[in-house]
Amino acid sequence: MSSFVPLTPTLTLENVVPAPLAESVPAGSQVWDTRLALTPGRHYHVSAVSGKGKSTLVSILYGLRQDYRGSVRFDGRDIRAFTPGDWATHRQRCFSIVFQDLRLFLHHSGWENILVKTDLYGPPDRPAIRRLADRLDVGSLLDKPCGRLSYGERQRMALLRALVPPFGWLLLDEPFSHLDRDNAERAAGLIAEACASRNAGLVVTSLGEDSRFGASQPIRL
Amino acid sequence: MKALLTKILWSRTGRWQFASAGLGFGLGLLLLLTSLQLYLDVRRLLQTNARRADYLILHKDISLANTLGLAASTFSEAEVDRLRRQPFVEQLGLFTAGQFGATAEGSLAVSFYTQLFFESVPDAFLDEVPDGWRWNEASERLPIIVSQDFLNLYNFGYAPSQGLPQLSRATIRLVPLRVTIRGPKGQRAYEGRIVGFSDRIASVLVPDSFMRWANRSIGNVPSPPPSRLIVRVSDAADPVLAGYLARFNYQTNNNQLKAGQTGRVVQLAMSLIGVVGLFFIGLSFVLFTTQFRAVIAEAREEITLLLQLGYRAATLAAHLLVYFALFLALTAGLAFGLLALAVSRAQAFAQQQGIALGAGVSGAVLLTGLGFVGLCLAINALSVRRLLRKGR
């Protein structure tokens, strides 16, 4: 894993308006229908109330949605021209993600959910994964099927899956929505460490202001 | 092969569903190949038989008028020509009857004396032209072909009653016969040799060349009209042929016509089995393909998520196809094994009944089976690729 060189493109949005917001672009948005450049290695915190397009932004950056006008460029390359192969490459070498709806294999254990991702990069460092899991207080739950865990525990498993592999950009869509204060603090610490050790960029969304991302550049939707 | 990927992709699919689809495919393949094999075997068998049935020996019905010398049992030139022009006649040969008396005398261990007759047909109508089937005016030896039936009559009727030894086909060829022919123009003696046997023609045959010479030089009629005809027909079961024979009151060996008709029925039955087999395989093919697509559809969420985690569609397709190919190979292997077993049993049974079928599974059947499995794999490979390309 150490020899793996992640991709760290500049992510640029130019006059992007997603289809659901086409009729009602929020006035004064720093993301929609304007120009926004996300610089590699920097941290961005997108906070807004529901329905402003937080998940839409993450989905567009991750290549899951194409229903927008305007253009999104990675290092100047329009992502509309990406092939499925290009997206596979970016999902392996550029992005790591926690989806808002987590998207875990519920019939499979935490271990299996994490390893199916790390398998893309070579043999896993199991003790390191175990240490990370212990810090999030889910080390003892790694062998349980994810379907039998609480939502908060699942959220931490999804976070582990995102933090273990290499990445150039970390995308987190409301990662603390079901975490208590202590766990959220610990998770924020881990996220900061993981990004720092990789010199990676971060885009994190939350429902409201979140003091745990004080060091990030706030972006208004 | 990544075990974890296997576990995730196949965990939720119904194994029983897959297994039953495989069973359907295997049985369909087995049925198709078995019926194809049987079809080939029976067709070969019928073709061997048909070769005999295709030759008909025609003669006129003998009535009291013939006995009294008021009607001719021979065929006139006009009659022969008319028959020759019929569409079902491929080849026509004349029997020439000897116009002289003949006797044969056994020697060595087989001592007998008998009067007999000779006929001849053109060589093309013999079952096979045996070695030594030649005669010219300088020859002292006279080659003879007798009907297999005559040998049987001798061995099982004549020889036991006269205290003579029974003779195999091989030993009878070694027995020299003293053959004498007598006619108005003199007599000649020859050393006769039985050189072959005929299943087709119930007669005592000598070469055509000898017959022509003897009728002219010994007998009293140089070129007598033929009393019997041998005809090669394209299809002995042709109803037009049967109608023609009935109209002119020509007689023939009816069994041969019947054999032709029976063969027809069997062939039709085999074709039907083949069609049913084809139908079955089509059905099981569709079933298997749909089932495989259903398996993929059931694993759709997993596949989508794996693609979202960064797996390449080609990797997943290859993974699915390897399993599919393994499964197909297993099923087909099983079907082939059962086929070989069934075929060898059927052939052994047929052998017991005195029917010689081919040995083992025919190459054409194996090729058909392999081609079919390959086609199945290729079509499913395409459909998997297309399914995966749609998902992101």
Image (cartoon, coloured by chain):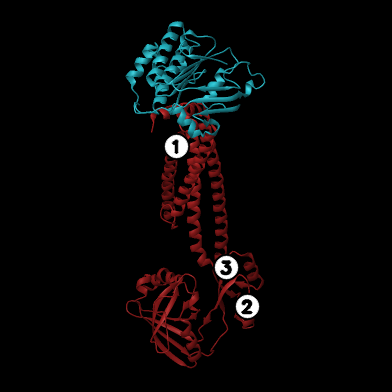
Chain colours: A cyan, B red
Label 2 SS: helix
Q: What chain does badge 2 belong to?
A: B
Neighbours of disc 1 within 10 Å: few (<14), some (14-19), many (20+): some
Q: Position of residue A64 (x, y in %)?
A: 54, 26
Confirm whether circles 1 and 2 share one chain: yes
Q: Which label sits on residue B64? A: 2
Q: Relative to the observer, which residue lies in front, B220 or B358?
A: B358
At a point 33% along the width and 22% down the height, the residue shown is A125
Residue B211 location in percent, x, y? 48, 84
> Given the image, what chain letter belongs to the residue carrying mark 3?
B
Q: Position of residue A107 (x, y in %)?
A: 46, 21
Mark seen at residue A37:
none
Residue B318: image tag: 1
Mark 3 Cα within 10 Å, few/some/many (few <14, many 20+)? some
What x and y, as percent, mark residue B45?
A: 48, 59
User: What secondary structure is found at the residue carrying circle 3?
Assistant: loop
The amino acid sitting under disc 3 is Ser
Residue placed most toward the observer, B348 or A139: A139
Mark seen at residue B234: 3
